[in-house]
Every structure is written in C-alpha cells, then in structure tokens.
Amino acid sequence: MWEGVTQYLTEDGVRGTFEVLAKVGTGSRLVFTYVRRDFLDGTAMYGAERLYRRFAVKERLWRFGMAPGEVATVLAEYGWRELEQLGASEFTTRYVQPTGRAAPVSECERSVYAEEL
C-alpha cells in the first residue's frame, strides 16, 4: 500500500521507488494513489482550488502527477500491470456509499491496483 505519497516526490523519486518494487515477486500486488497531472499544472481544478493554491502553488509540496491514461504504460516499464484504476465516482460508489456515510472524495486523486508480472 503506497497511499498519499507520490505527489510529494519528484518524478525521479517515484521512478526510483518503482525500480525497487520491480524486484518483488511475481504476483505481488500494489495499491497506490496519485494526483492528476492536469490538477498540478493548473489546467483542471476538480473543485479543489484551495488544495491547488496551497499544495501546488504556495507551499510547492505536491510535485508529481500522472494522467490516468499513462499509468499502465509507466507500470509496464517496471514489470507491473494495472488491474484497476478508480476515480472519485467509482471510489464513492464502491467504498463510501455502502457505509451509509457521506464522505467527500476528490477527483484530483486516483487509486490504482496493480500486479507484478
């Protein structure tokens, strides 16, 4: 489980982690989150303007993002395959609604489930 970390790293840091993870055994599973690149570069706000101003602009803590369509390609470079990727609507439907709670889920962050080949 690698949750809420990738956006704080540089691209080299993320790729270095994937290099280490490439050495785990076949069939290993990984769940990780990432922030969308279009959010970090300011082209799409997903209703999270305040987060963008704080973490991407003012404090510059969020550095790395990906586009949803490129995740499978990046994973493949390190011997992994994407099994599933969830955005806010899928995550809410699957995990939040069944609890009967109303918890906000941001569209600027996505979850990925992957398997080592």
Image (cartoon, rainbow, N blue to C red):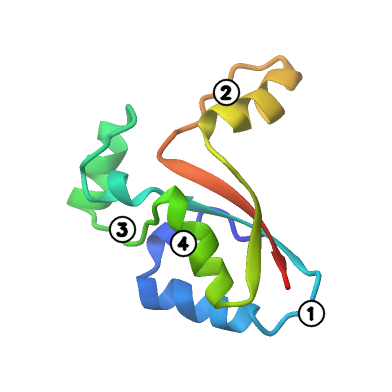
Residue drawn at (45%, 49%) of the image: 68
User: How would you rate the neighbour count of disc 1 (Cα within 10 Å): few for under 14, some for 14-19, many for 20 or more?
Assistant: few
Query: x, y (%) of residue 112?
Result: 60, 52
Location of the N terminus (image quadrant): bottom right
Q: Earlier in the sequence, mark 2 or mark 3?
A: 3
Q: Which residue is mark 1?
A: 25
Tell me if residue 115 comes above or below residue 89 in the rendering: below
Q: Earlier in the sequence, mark 3 or mark 1?
A: 1
Q: Nearer the viewer, mark 2 or mark 1?
A: 1
CA gap between label 3 and label 1 equals: 32 Å
CA gap between label 2 and label 1 equals: 36 Å
Which secondary structure lies at badge 3?
loop
Under mark 1, the amino acid is Gly
Query: x, y (%) of residue 113?
Result: 66, 53
User: How would you rate the neighbour count of disc 3 (Cα within 10 Å): few for under 14, some for 14-19, many for 20 or more?
Assistant: few
Mark number, residue 6: 4
Q: Nearer the viewer, mark 4 or mark 1?
A: 1
Q: Earlier in the sequence, mark 4 or mark 3?
A: 4
Under mark 2, the amino acid is Ala
Q: Which residue is mark 3?
A: 61
Q: Left or right: 41 with respect to 12? A: left
Q: Are marks 4 and 1 in contact (CB under 8 Å)?
A: no
Under mark 4, the amino acid is Thr
Q: Left or right: 114 with respect to 19? A: right
Residue drawn at (19%, 50%) of the image: 57
Residue drawn at (61%, 32%) of the image: 91
Which secondary structure lies at badge 1?
loop
